[in-house]
């Protein structure tokens, strides 16, 4: 009697299929986390670049006009341009500014991003320690890593630029600060 060899079809078992699905799920989770980190880094780079550009524009304005220009009525998300408060969206630069001292304040600095921005920007400046009426001009309070920054050494003329972003729409803002007193750019709530 001759033995016939039967070819048996080889297929995935249920356990092998479940392992493949688990591995694909883990890889998708890692890719999503990496993409979100990449997007956050890109947005933070936008804010750092814009703060650096605004600082350079302020120094250029001062060299040409003898003083800094104050653009916003205050600092923080309530005074941000081009949109206040900023959220998990991008806004085009160049529209009307209802939180600015004048409608042409940002135009006087000649700051123009190349694309819509995710962060909102506010800028305050003072060219003397007192107003025309003799009142003392207070330097705004900035919070960095949970404590107020010591800006007591900053004297007139001065400026402070603040970028605020709520990149995931959860109401917690990432702040990027630049000022005339130092060449540093400060980032607060970076991982929020």
Image (cartoon, rainbow, N blue to C red):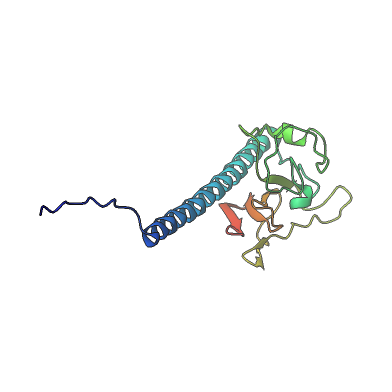
Q: Quadrant of the N terminus?
A: bottom left
Residue 86 in view in this figure: yes
Q: Please tell me which residue is depicted at 60% across the width and 39% down the height of the picture.
A: 53
Check the image and name the residue furthest to the front. 1
State the residue at coordinates (78%, 48%).
79
In the image, 74 versus 163, the foreground residue is 163
Which of the two residues, 97 or 11, is positioned nearer the viewer here? 11
Left or right, 9 with reference to 161: left
Q: Please tell me which residue lies in front, 156 or 5.
A: 5
Q: Work out which residue is located at the far bottom of the displayed protein and give it.
A: 147
Q: Check the image and report above or below for 29 versus 60.
A: below
Quarter containing the C terminus: bottom right
Q: Position of residue 81 (x, y in %)?
A: 74, 42
Residue 66 quadrant: top right
Quadrant in the picture for residue 71: top right
Q: Is 158 left, or right, of 2 in this rendering?
A: right
């Amino acid at each position: 009697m001759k033995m016939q060899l039967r070819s048996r079809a080889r297929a995935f078992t249920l356990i092998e299929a479940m392992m493949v699905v688990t591995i694909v799920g883990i890889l998708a989770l890692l890719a999503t986390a990496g993409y979100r980190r990449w997007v956050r880094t890109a947005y933070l780079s936008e804010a750092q670049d814009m703060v650096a550009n605004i600082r350079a524009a302020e120094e250029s304005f001062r060299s040409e006009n003898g003083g800094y220009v104050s653009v916003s009525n205050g600092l923080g998300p309530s005074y941000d341009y081009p949109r206040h408060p900023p959220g998990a969206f991008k806004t085009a630069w160049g529209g009307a500014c209802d939180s600015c001292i004048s409608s042409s304040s940002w135009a006087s600095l000649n700051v123009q991003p190349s694309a819509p921005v995710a962060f909102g920007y506010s800028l305050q400046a003072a060219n003397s320690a007192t107003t025309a009426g003799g009142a003392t001009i207070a330097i705004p309070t900035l919070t960095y890593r949970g404590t107020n920054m010591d800006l007591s050494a900053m004297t007139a003329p001065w400026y402070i630029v603040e970028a605020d972003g709520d990149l995931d729409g959860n109401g917690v803002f990432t702040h990027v600060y630049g000022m005339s007193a130092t060449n540093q750019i400060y980032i607060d709530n970076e991982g929020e």
